Image (spheres, rainbow, N blue to C red):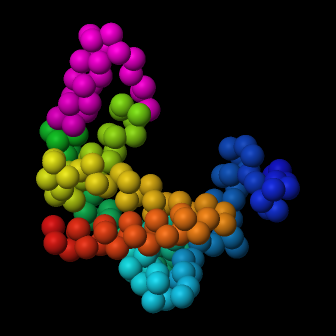
């Protein structure tokens, strides 16, 4: 581990250290509601059953539910949609290249691919899938050490907008 003076914490600086941290049961990942509750109600609700923030036995139960929903047949059944989305992204890159523009492998392919797949799984209309990434980016800023007040505000708004969108969807 490496001590980070600015954050005042130890960091796992190599794969071996990170692997040990992830496997160390004493370092748990149990979600603690953000406070005050009335300001964070929707955000807390969205995270209360997160696999990432849970430990056994809750983690085991949630993982079993997800495993049932994403069994081999379900994943194989997603192949046509994933191929369609992948081809759409590659076609857009091809258009850029043929018109003499540069493309960015991350911005034009690696980042939008999982977001588009998740939007498709959630049933977002294609015309509205662009909404998912900004909400996700704002919400995950809360995983940073000491998120700024602006990040906190953005996360609350994004959680509320996402929850309302999914309810109506």
Q: Residue at x 40, y 70 (%)?
A: 157
Q: Nearer the viewer, residue 29 or 137?
A: 137
Q: How many marks?
A: 0
Which corner quadrant of the image does residue 113 belong to? top left
Residue 82, given in percent of the width and then of the height, sits at 22, 40
Q: Does 154 sit above or below residue 106?
A: below
Residue 90, given in percent of the width and then of the height, sits at 27, 25
Is residue 72 visible in this depiction of the protein? no
Residue 111, given in percent of the width and then of the height, sits at 40, 40
Is residue 68 visible in this depiction of the protein? yes
Q: Does 94 sit above or below residue 148?
A: above
Which corner quadrant of the image does residue 122 belong to? bottom left
The residue positioned farthest toward the front in the image shown: 150
Q: Residue at x 53, y 83 (%)?
A: 33
Asked if the stretch drawn in magenta spans residue 40, the answer is: no
Which region of the structure is painted magenta? Answer: 84-106
Q: Nearer the viewer, residue 14 or 45?
A: 45
Q: Is residue 102 left or right of residue 99?
A: right
Prevailing SS of the magenta stretch: helix
Q: Residue at x 74, y 52 (%)?
A: 12
Which corner quadrant of the image does residue 143 belong to? bottom right
Q: Does 140 sit above or below residue 64?
A: above
Image quadrant occupied by the C terminus? bottom left
Q: Residue at x 51, y 74 (%)?
A: 54
Q: Is residue 164 left or right of residue 7?
A: left
Residue 130, given in percent of the width and then of the height, sits at 27, 49
Q: Does 169 sit above or below residue 123?
A: below
Asked if the stretch drawn in magenta spans residue 95, the answer is: yes
């Amino acid at each position: 581990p490496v001590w980070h003076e600015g954050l005042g914490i130890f960091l796992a600086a190599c794969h071996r250290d990170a692997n040990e941290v992830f496997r160390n049961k004493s370092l748990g990942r149990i979600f603690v509601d953000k406070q005050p509750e009335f300001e964070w109600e929707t955000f807390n609700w969205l995270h209360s059953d997160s696999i990432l923030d849970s430990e056994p036995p809750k983690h085991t139960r949630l993982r079993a539910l997800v495993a049932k929903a994403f069994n081999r047949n379900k994943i194989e059944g997603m192949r046509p949609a994933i191929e369609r989305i992948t081809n759409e992204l590659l076609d857009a890159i091809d258009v850029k290249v043929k018109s003499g523009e540069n493309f960015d492998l991350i911005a034009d392919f690696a980042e939008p691919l999982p977001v588009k797949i998740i939007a498709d799984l959630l049933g977002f209309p294609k015309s509205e899938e662009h909404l998912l990434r900004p909400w996700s980016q704002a919400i995950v800023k809360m995983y940073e050490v000491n998120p700024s007040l602006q990040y906190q505000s953005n996360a609350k708004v994004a959680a509320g907008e996402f929850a309302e969108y999914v309810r109506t969807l």
